[in-house]
């Protein structure tokens, strides 16, 4: 377990729901998908590179994901990841996406 985090550090994170618009292979060193995600009119469209390779393109497009949208952009080789999509380690080098139980508008705040 990691050290106890201060609540204000957690409260500073802006977690939002987004809808995956497109998926393509990223050019990063590690095998990852490059996801283009719609976070609604306030935030717009953002890109995230993630290890969701246990999903096909067809399984991801149109799905909703939960992401942290206010972290600095992360450079991953030639790619840039603008948001951090949350997932659970699947134990085999991939990730299981964290999502919502029912559809919500893109950009909805996770509280």
Image (cartoon, rainbow, N blue to C red):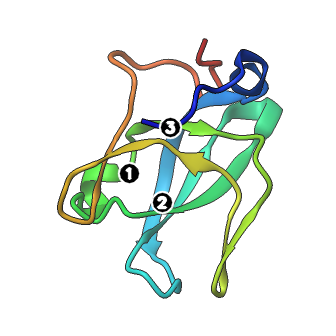
SS at circle 3: loop
Task: Indicate the quadrant where residue 108 lies.
Answer: top right
Of the image marks 3 and 2, the number of the one nearer the N terminus:
3
Instruction: Residue 47: give x, y in percent of width and height.
Output: 63, 59
Question: Can you say whether 89 is above or below 14 in the image?
Answer: below
Decide: marks 3, 2 in contact (CB < 8 A)?
A: no
Quarter-wise, where is residue 14 in the image? top right
Closest to the camera, between mark 3 and mark 1, is 3
At x 57% / y 39%, what residue is drawn? 67
How far apart are the alpha carbons under marks 1 and 2? 6 Å
Q: Is residue 2 above or below residue 56?
A: above
Residue 57 sits in quarter: bottom left
Q: Nearer the viewer, residue 96 or 23?
A: 96
* Quadrant in the picture for the C terminus: top right
Which residue is found at the position 59% from the left and 18% from the top? 110
Please give the residue where the numbered disc 1 appears in the rendered image.
Answer: 61
Asked whether the residues under the numbered discs 1 and 2 touch, taking CB atoms below 8 Å apart as contact, a structural biologist would say yes
Residue density around tag 1, few if under 14, some if 14–19, many if 20 or more, within 10 Å: some
Q: Is residue 33 left or right of residue 105?
A: left
């Amino acid at each position: 377990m990691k050290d106890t985090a201060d609540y204000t550090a957690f409260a500073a994170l802006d977690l939002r729901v987004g809808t995956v618009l497109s998926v393509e292979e990223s050019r990063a060193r590690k095998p990852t998908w490059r996801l283009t995600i719609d976070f609604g009119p306030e935030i717009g469209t953002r890109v995230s590179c993630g290890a969701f390779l246990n999903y096909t393109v067809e399984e991801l497009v149109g799905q909703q994901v939960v992401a942290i949208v206010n972290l600095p952009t992360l450079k991953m080789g030639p790619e840039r990841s603008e948001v951090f999509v949350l997932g659970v380690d699947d134990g085999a080098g991939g990730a299981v996406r964290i999502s919502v139980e029912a559809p919500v508008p893109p950009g909805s705040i996770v509280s």
